[in-house]
Image: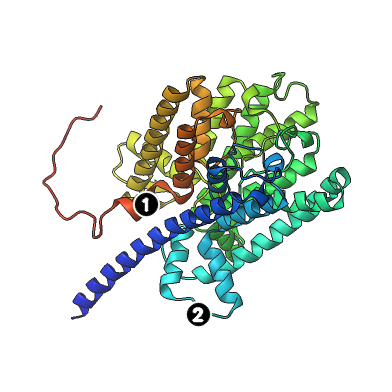
Amino acid sequence: MIRIWKEKNAAWGSHRGMNATRLTALSFGGVILLGTLLLLLPGMSRSGESAGLLTSLFTATSATCVTGLALADTLAQWSLAGQAVILCMIQLGGLGFMTVYTLLLTFFRREILLSQRMMLASSLGLRGTGGVVRLVRHALLGTAILEGAGAVILSCFFVPKFGLPRGVWYAVFHSVSAFCNAGFDLMGPQGGSLALFADQPVVLAVHGALVILGGLGFFVWEDVYRQRRWKKFSLYTQMVLGMTVFLILAGWVYFLLAEWSNPATLGPMAADDKVVNALFQSVTLRTAGFASIHQGGLRESSQVMCLLFMFIGGSSGSTAGGVKTVTILVLAAALWSGLRGRQTVALRGRTIPARQVFNAFTLTLTVLVTVFVCTMAISLWEGGSFLSILYEVTSAVGTVGLSTGLTGSLSAGSCLVIVALMYMGRVGILSFSLAFMIPKGGGDKVRYPTCDVMIG
């Protein structure tokens, strides 16, 4: 009897987990739909006329999926009300609908049910529900503190330049956009994202710090807060922090050397500004979307390096996109184990389960194939530079938001492909598959005899 009860309970949990994943994916779709309908209203545009279905859908998807790609400039196209709607979608998309829902339940002193805890864990990329409510509460408090502090510091620079009301609004908008790794800005079509502040290291530092903290993930926050010592951190937290520092430093050195004398990017700047802007480029590439230098002016070798960084992205359970830092580290460990003839994958004295290694390979290859197919399709439709199209597609699926300037010239069909890529990039390719493509009760029902084949 006990065995039968355990099997039924496990099956129920699996079924509920499937529902949680699907509802998480659908919640993003619901926010996108609502945002599209709101942005369609004439009052949301500066001109007083509706922005049109395509522009509204593209902007709502980009904001909810915290990407930053846009068919129309945020300041020039949208009124204050429209900007406020975009900001709300960025916050909802960055934190996750279920996280905000938990805040409302807590505020009204309502009980958080098991099914809601499972949806929370699914939306944050967690494997279990233990301590998930506490983690969410700490995440919300930390988010409010960081976004508030960022807005205060940015106000000191924006208010003298834009005046009190606009300066404060710009500071709040940019602080939320940076922490959520969204990349939306209010600098206008002539501002070139943060190019106006390329010689203001504090402004770039605030944006960069918010981007990094938002991209670490709430689980890492909780682990650092509770343990406070490197040796006590979980292996996952050590992997995230180690990869984050390595990628930032590697990108910083590369862009500093590659773009130092490029007249279209770092070339005209003073030496200290070159150092700061190269560092900011390295930080913003992994899903932030802000730019202090023109991405179209980068050397081709630098654009290829940008593709790699956008593909990797940030960390699981964070506001960032990409295949995630730990995924790449697991693949590297698997490669190293394979080269040494080992049958298992180990990191720092711990064995990585074969299922997780398989998931890492599945995710990475799926994203690579998706990027290749979509790039080829858009290239056939649009023509033009293949590298620029690849840059756009990778930016979309990695929810980065950086562009070489191609977005506004895309046809309606290509825009819809980018919309789909942004959605799948935010929800997660594996989560999307789990939610909609795997049949109920899916899994290995039959085990076949093994067979050795020749590899390589």
In this view, the residue in front, 39 or 311, is 39
Name the residue located 24 percent from the left edge and 73 percent from the top edge: 8
Q: Quadrant of the C terminus?
A: top left
Name the residue located 79 percent from the left edge and 43 percent from the top edge: 202
Q: Position of residue 7 (x, y in %)?
A: 23, 71
Name the residue located 82 percent from the left edge and 46 percent from the top edge: 158
In the rendered structure, which disc, 1 or 2, sits on the residue that comes first in sequence? Answer: 2
Query: With respect to residue 392, does 323 lie above or below?
Result: below
In this view, the residue in front, 58 or 451, is 58
Q: Position of residue 163 (x, y in %)?
A: 87, 48
Query: With respect to residue 44, does 264 lie above or below?
Result: above
Query: With respect to residue 163, does 7 lie above or below?
Result: below
Q: Position of residue 145 (x, y in %)?
A: 70, 62
Secondary structure, mark 1, is: strand
Q: Position of residue 63 (x, y in %)?
A: 58, 48
Q: CA distance from mark 1 to mark 2?
A: 38 Å
* Amino acid at dot 1: Thr
359 with respect to 144 (left or right): left
> Circle 2 is placed at which residue position?
111
Question: Image quarter for residue 452?
Answer: top left
Name the residue located 29 percent from the left edge and 70 percent from the top edge: 12
> Circle 1 is placed at which residue position?
351
